Amino acid sequence: RKVIYTTNAIESLNYQLRKVTKNRGHFPSTDAAVKLLWLAICNIEDKRAADRARDRGKPASQRKAQGRLVEGQVVTNWKQALAQLAAAYPDRITPYL
């Protein structure tokens, strides 16, 4: 549960993605929607990376930057959580392992 329960980060990302798609309205194809969402995630991560760079060297109590969204996020016990997800949803998880 601790690995998956990241409500604040997920809700923050969902809010920002909803904001991007709401401004666009409709999409000519699924590929266009996926491309817009991918570019939005990259943009969000770039902003967070700049915030982390600004906070680098400060004590943890003074940092204000949010964590990574896309790459390099450190997660503990991920293998155990993935094994449980694969057991619960074999048709969704197993093809990607």
Image (cartoon, grey):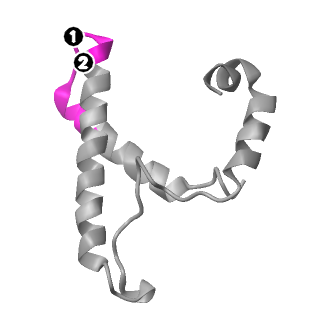
Task: Check the image and name the residue furthest to the left.
Answer: 24
Front residue of 67/33: it is 67
| Residue 61: image location, x then y, percent | 43, 87
User: Within 10 Å of the Cα at label 1, are there few (<14), some (14-19), or many (20+) other Cα atoms?
Assistant: few
Provide the secondary structure element on which disc 2 rests.
helix
| Residue 50: image location, x then y, percent | 23, 64
Residue 51 is left or right of residue 69, and the answer is: left
Q: Residue at x 32, y 40 (%)?
A: 17
Q: Residue at x 23, y 75 (%)?
A: 54
User: Within 10 Å of the Cα at label 2, are there few (<14), some (14-19), or many (20+) other Cα atoms?
Assistant: few
With respect to residue 48, does 4 lie above or below? above
Hey, what amino acid is under mark 2? Answer: Ala
Q: Residue at x 49, y 58 (%)?
A: 8
Q: Residue 27 magenta-drawn? A: yes
Hey, what amino acid is under mark 1? Answer: Pro
With respect to residue 72, does 54 lie above or below? below
Quadrant into which the C terminus falls: top right
Q: Residue 61 magenta-drawn? A: no
Q: Image quadrant of residue 86? A: top right
Q: Residue at x 63, y 54 (%)?
A: 5
In this rendering, the label closer to the viewer, 2 or 1: 2
Mark 2 near mark 1, Cβ–Cβ under 8 Å?
A: yes
Q: Which residues are magenta?
A: 19-31
Which numbered disc covers residue 32? 2
Q: Which residue is mark 1?
A: 28
| Residue 51: image location, x then y, percent | 26, 68
Provide the secondary structure element on which disc 1 rests.
loop
Q: CA distance from mark 2 to mark 1?
A: 7 Å
